[in-house]
Amino acid sequence: MARRPVILVADDAEDIRNLLGELLAKDYDVKSAASGHEALLAADTEPLPDLILLDIELPDTDGFEVLRRLKANPALADIPVIFITGRTAPEDEARGLAGGAVDYLTKPISPPITLARVRTQLALVNQRRALEEEVRARTEELAQTRIEIIRRLARAMEYREGGLTQRLPRVAEYVALLCGALGLKGRVCEVLAQASALYDIGKLGVAEHILAKAEALNEREWTQMRRHPEIGAGIIGEHRDPLLAQARVMALTHHERWDGTGYPARLKGDAIPLPGRIMALADAYEAMTATQRHRAPLPAEEAARRIAAESGKQFDPRVVAAFLKVAREFDAVRARHRDELAGIHDLDFAAPGKL
């Protein structure tokens, strides 16, 4: 059953409140107030009104001030207000409409006209809400599409490196765990975990024979490999969108080192953006504990020991401390996303809300 619209009637005259209450009660739920203070309290009390019928001459504060306070409250500012008043001067009507009222009716009340104006404003409210819902749904759909494109692009890079693995979901969860242990807000953790999919996208610009080489790289090959952070940043580009902006930061700075000996810019300490410092540790743990062409994975305990030993050198000590709090959970993630479970059809990450 659809919710009946709620209308707030604010008038100091009891006979007017009763008249409007009887007139509206057939189709609407009616709340009433006899003063400006009561009107503001009733407007901000559940259920919130869908429409307010407001007198100007109230005993404690006039309707213009009530309207001003309503419009100053973000939770109430969109509620349409119709003035119903005995003031007939054009300047009063102009002042009311300039203050944000949607209509201005003068007393004595005409029931048919009042009902018609109420229905018109409620129809506009419904249209606005429907449009807002459509925009919200469309925005959410576009956001999900963007995330999927990011994931597919990251998967394309994995194919180029030799085939699908579970690296991307592992790394996303490592990043989310580190963010949580650092006390970052949930939405920040979600964005950084999603953005992590593109942190190594710059390897698309590295020669395939270098990516596929099993033995150690020579100096020339390392020079090419060290270009991948800048290549990645160039592929992602510069954006105002938070997800892509953080993806670029992570791609560009995940090989910087806390002691300033990393690449490409030899940033040091807090000059390295926090997303890059988080990504550096997550990437290192992944590299140590996943099967590589040239070696078997390290045990989780050994990887944790090596990371702890690099605190203040390769890694931000605060990020290392956060890692040590959740190291067991890292190992659980690794066990849950084993590479032998990966297949050509296994393309899904953990959903953003489940990271």
Image: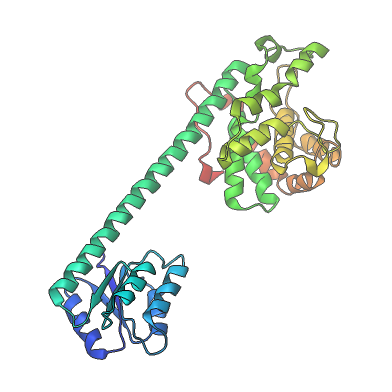
Q: Nearer the viewer, residue 80 or 164?
A: 80
Seen as rendered, the residue at the extreme top is 209
Q: Nearer the viewer, residue 90 or 160?
A: 90
In this rendering, position of residue 118 left or right of residue 234:
left
- Picture coordinates of residue 27 (x, y %)? 18, 71
Splitting the image into 4 quarters, where does residue 100 fall? bottom left
- Picture coordinates of residue 1 (x, y %)? 22, 62
Splitting the image into 4 quarters, where does residue 213 fall? top right
- Picture coordinates of residue 297 (x, y %)? 73, 26
Q: Nearer the viewer, residue 338 or 173?
A: 173
Q: How many marks?
A: 0
- 338 lies above or below 219: below
Residue 14 seen: yes
Q: What is the image's colouring?
A: rainbow
- Picture coordinates of residue 44 (x, y %)? 41, 74
- 334 lies above or below 221: below
Seen as rendered, the residue at the extreme left is 112
Q: Residue at x 61, y 38 (%)?
A: 245
Q: Residue at x 26, y 59 (%)?
A: 124
Residue 2 seen: no
Q: Residue at x 59, y 51 (%)?
A: 186
In this rendering, position of residue 111 left or right of residue 308:
left
- 24 lies above or below 312: below
In this rendering, position of residue 100 left or right of residue 295:
left
In this rendering, position of residue 41 left or right of residue 127:
right
Tell me the quadrant of the picture where the C terminus can be found: top right
Q: Nearer the viewer, residue 350 or 250?
A: 250
Q: Residue at x 73, y 35 (%)?
A: 280
